[in-house]
Image (cartoon, rainbow, N blue to C red):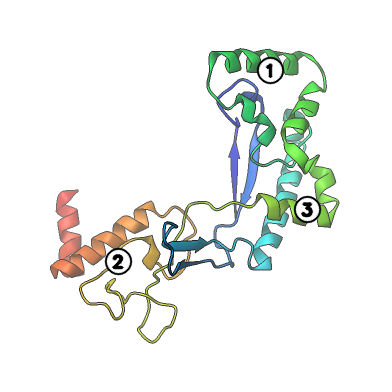
Amino acid sequence: MALALGSRASWHAIAGRMAHFSPLVMAPASRGQVRLRPGHGGDPACVVEYNLLGDPRDAARLSEGLFRIARLLSSPEVSPLVGVPVGASRLANAARFSLRTPANALRAQAIATLLDIVPGLGDRVVGSIGGPGGALADLLADPARLAEFVRANVAPLAHHSGTCRMGSADDPLSVVDRQGRVHGVSGLRIADASVMPSVPRGNTNLPVLMVAERISDLILGRSAPAAAALAGSLI
């Protein structure tokens, strides 16, 4: 698990007075799939199904993450710095301010000034902008509402991987061998995050670079020590 946090929600003055906290599942138990769409016609040839929360353990971990955020925000060190936390996602009611225009900037600044000088106004405004989640404490006190909130607001993190996972030829779930060669197809290799046999617990950019470097070495017939020496000379 990880915690994403930010000191502002968007570009304008209202968002500059709103922090956001989100629990992240970095090693999900749920698994999705990518499959071909036969006779797709003008539709996309592939169907991508994330199957988010397909494993109940992920929903439980996200719910526990919200409890941890509530404990953090209610701690004596943090609580004097924040208003009433609300369960919010995507802030649909704030979309009217999303467009960066002079008119929106003036409107947002006027509202933000009122938030600073009128006691309690900030809690009411943030609660209305936050959508149907309501106060975080009320949400956590109702297991059914909490489960519904998590399921309605879960989103992928763009670390997609494993759709052409590496493995042995007798593994029905594997697509490529240890050199990135597609099982049963000659002359075709894959060298990106799709060959990872398990979902990584962080950003995929650097691991993908190393996967590509390693498979390019194999294509060119370079041994691993030779490739390492070449990398050292480049540095």
Q: Judge the density around disc 3: few (<14), some (14-19), many (≥20) Cα neighbours within 10 Å.
A: many
Q: Residue furthest bottom?
A: 170
| Nearer to us in this view, 21 or 54 | 54
Residue 196 horizontal/vertical position (percent) = 40, 67
Image position of 199 with respect to 134: above or below: below
- 109 or 83: nearer the eye? 109
Badge nearest the viewer, 1 or 2? 2
What's the residue at 67%, 49% (across, down)?
A: 153
Percent x, y for residue 74? 78, 40
Q: Amino acid at mark 1?
A: Ala
Q: Nearer the viewer, residue 117 or 151?
A: 151
Residue shown at 77% from the left, 36% from the top: 76
Q: Which element carries disc 3, helix, strand or loop?
A: helix
Q: Residue 20's image quarter?
A: top right
Q: Which residue is mark 1?
A: 112
The residue located at (48%, 64%) in the rendering is 199
- Is residue 20 visible from the viewing direction of this image? yes
Q: Residue 113 versus residue 222: which sits nearer the camera?
A: 113
Q: Which residue is mark 3?
A: 146
Badge 2 amino acid: Ile
Pinpoint residue 107: horizontal percent, then vertical percent: 65, 15
N-terminal label among 1 and 2 = 1
- Mark 2 lies on a secondary structure that is loop
Q: Which mark is residue 190?
A: 2
Residue at 69%, 55% (x, y): give it.
Answer: 151
Q: Quadrant of the N terminus?
A: bottom right
Q: Give the mark nearer the N terminus: 2 vs 3.
A: 3
